[in-house]
Amino acid sequence: MVKISASILSKRNLDTINELNQLDIDYFHIDVMDGEFVSNISFSLEELNKFEGSFQKPLDVHLMVNNPDNYFETLKRLNTEYVTIHYEILKDEELLNKIKDYGFKCGISLNPQTPIESIYPYLQKIDLVLIMSVDPGYGGQPFLFNSLSRIKSLKEEINNQQVNVLVSIDGGINLINYQEISKYKPDLVVLGTSLIDSLQPNDLISKFREM
Ligand code: DX5
Ligand code: ZN
């Protein structure tokens, strides 16, 4: 069954967090943006600190930042399970080791324009690949359908290398396009706008899980 990670990018407040704490989600997807790697800014260190103790589901943290190191200490104090950095800022494996040393599971995300094969040399070292199905930076964008062939290729490579790596997909996912996406069997889906704007979020989540 697919795991669901809820992005609260558009409503970063305690009321929303508390509502989501009551829902059948697996993770909070925390979109951290530094105004450098992407032009938008979200979840500054101050904002993250403010939410310490609020998250009752583990965090799946998506660092759209140039300097991920700055965030690890703060994330340690939150309920963080996955820390995902971007392939586009990765210089060497030292950063991946550091994430592991902190006790986090380690993910790498790829922008839609980055060839999916770029990640293949790292698959032995990581726990999750986050495929961006929109350009990073904003919620509410339309899903890029060429992401589907990227899921397929990546899953084949994971199978070839016989590694235990989850495939997550992030951006523009709703119940309508998920009918097609689900055929490619991602392990985890990130839901932003479609979940946050839903009037019956529990029904929505059950429908995703049934597909
Ligand atoms: C985009 C973020 C996504 C986004 C998902 O930069 O990484 O996680 O918030 O939101 P929707 O589902 O609205 O695209
Ligand atoms: Zn994200």
Image (cartoon, rainbow, N blue to C red):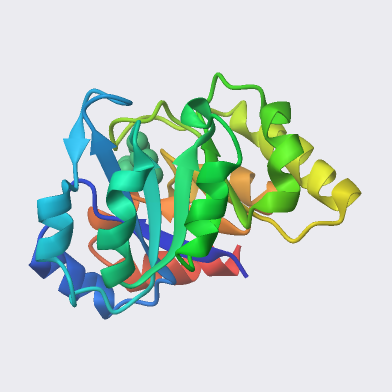
Vertical order, 77 against 134 (above or below)? below
Q: Report the front residue among 64 and 56.
A: 64
Name the foreground residue: 73 vs 160: 73
Residue 193 visible in image:
no
Which quadrant of the rendered structure holds the C terminus? bottom right
Ligand 2: give its quadrant: top left
Q: Which residue, as the protein is rendered here, is positioned at the far right? A: 160
Residue under the image location 10 percent in, 53 percent down: 46
Place residue 108 in its image quadrant: top right
| In the displayed structure image, the side of residue 96 where residue 35 appears, left or right | left
Residue 23: x %, y % from top left: 32, 76
Q: Which residue is rendered at x = 87% and y = 49% of the image?
A: 161
Number of on-image labels: 0
- Where residue 73 sits: x, y (%)? 29, 60
Q: Answer left or right for 149 relative to 203.
A: right
Q: Which residue is drawn at 49% across and 68% down?
A: 103
Q: In this view, does 198 lie to the left or right of 131?
A: left
Residue 90: percent from left, percent from top: 52, 32
Q: Is residue 69 above or below residue 77?
A: above
Residue located 53% across and 66% down the image: 3
Q: Position of residue 97 (x, y in %)?
A: 57, 52
Name the quadrant of the N terminus.
bottom right
Question: Could you tell me if residue 136 is visible in this image?
Answer: yes
